[in-house]
Image (tube, rainbow, N blue to C red):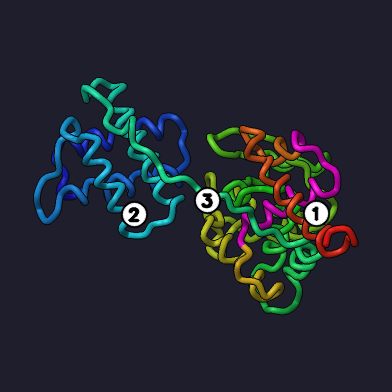
Amino acid sequence: MPGLNKELKKAIDDYLESLARRDESAHTLRNYSADLREFTEYFSPGETAPPAPADFDLLMLREWLAHLYEREQKPATIRRKMASLRGFFRFLSREHRIAANPARLLRSPKMPKSLPQVPNAEATNALVDGVGRDEPDRPYPKRDRLLFEILYGCGLRISEAVGLNTDDIDQTERWLRVRGKGKKERQAPYGSKAADALAGYLADRPVPAAQGNDSRALFLNHRGQRLSDRGARAIVGFYAAYVAGDSSIHPHTLRHAFATHLLSDGADLRSIQELLGHARLSTTQKYTRVSLTDLMRVYDSAHPKSK
C-alpha cells in the first residue's frame, strides 16, 4: 500500500493475515484489503502520511462515514466497509496496539427491508430447460445446463457451485459436498434432472489444464481451469437475457427461487435452512415474507371479499 506509514501498513497486513488464518474466504480478504486501502488513502491526501493507528478517533471515523454517504454509496457497501473497519480496530484493541477502540460506537446505516424478486416456478423451469439447447451456439452447453440445474435444483451460492470438485459428488446417492461460508461443509441432494445433466457434462468435460486443485474442479472454463465466480455470473446473465428476456436475473435469484418454491410447496423452514446452509433461521424467514406477499397478491386479485 503506497503512501502508508510503516506502523499502519504492518497493522493492516497483520490484520489481514489473522483473517487468513481464520480461513476467511478470498472474496472477504480481497474486499477488506480494498476497504482499508481506501480508508487510509482518504486520510493521506497527496503524499502526506496518514495517522498512526493509535491517532484515529471516533470523529475521524465518522468523517469517513460521512464521506461514503456523500459519494452516495449503497447501504450494503457502506455496511461492509464499516465491518472491515470495525474488525481492524477490534483486532488492534485485542492485540493491545491501541488504548481504546474508536470504532466501537460507530453506527452502520440500516438496510432497506426489500424482498427478493423471485420468478415463479413455471418461469424458472422454462429458463433452466432452455439452457444448453442447440440455439444459441455456445462452446460448453452441457456445462452451462449443469450449472443452472445445480444453482436452482440445489440452491447453491455461486461461489459454492464453482467451488465443487468432481470428488464432492456421490452419484449413487445423489449428494453434493458443499463448502459454504466460513469453510463450513454441508450435504445437498440433487434430483434426476441434475443427475442427467451431470452425466452428460462429465462425458464431455474438458481436459484440465494442469494438475492440482483446478484439475479436480467440476466446472472448467475454456482454458481448462476452474470456472470463476465472474465467469459463472456471465453465463447466468447471458441465458437470463437470451432465454427469459430478463437481464435482472442473477445467480442468487435462482437460490431465492429454490427456497421460495420449496416453501410454497410445503417444505418447512428448518429443512430449507439446512439446505441453504444458513447459520440462523431468521435469514431463512425472509422467504416466508416473499410467500405471504404472493399469497396476498393472489387473494387481492381473486377473492370476492378482498375488495
Closer to the camera, 132 or 255? 255
Read off the magenta span: 250-271
Q: Are there few (<14), some (14-19), or many (20+) residues within 10 Å of tag 2? A: some
Q: Is residue 303 magenta?
A: no
**Could you say which is closer to the camera, residue 178 or residue 67?**
67
Q: Earlier in the sequence, mark 3 or mark 2?
A: 2
- Answer left or right for 189 relative to 140: right
Measured as percent of width and height from the top left, residue 107 is found at 38, 38
Where disc 3 sits, the SS reads: loop
* Image quadrant occupied by the C terminus: bottom right
**Gap between marks 1 and 2, in whole Å?**
37 Å
Residue, x 20% and y 35% (percent of image)?
Answer: 56
Residue drawn at x 21%, y 50% is: 41
Q: Secondary structure at mark 1?
A: helix
**Which callout, 3 or 1, points at the residue further toward the start of the chain?**
3
Q: Amino acid at mark 1?
A: Leu
Report the residue marked by disc 2. Answer: 69
Residue 112: image tag: 3
Instruction: Answer whether residue 257 is magenta in the image.
Output: yes
Q: Residues within 10 Å of mark 1 (few under 14, many from 20)?
A: few
Position of 61 compared to 290: left or right?
left
Q: Is residue 226 visible?
A: yes
SS for dot 2: helix
Q: What mark, if any, has residue 295 been given in the picture?
A: 1
Identify which amino acid the numbered label 3 is placed on: Pro
Q: Amino acid at mark 2?
A: Tyr
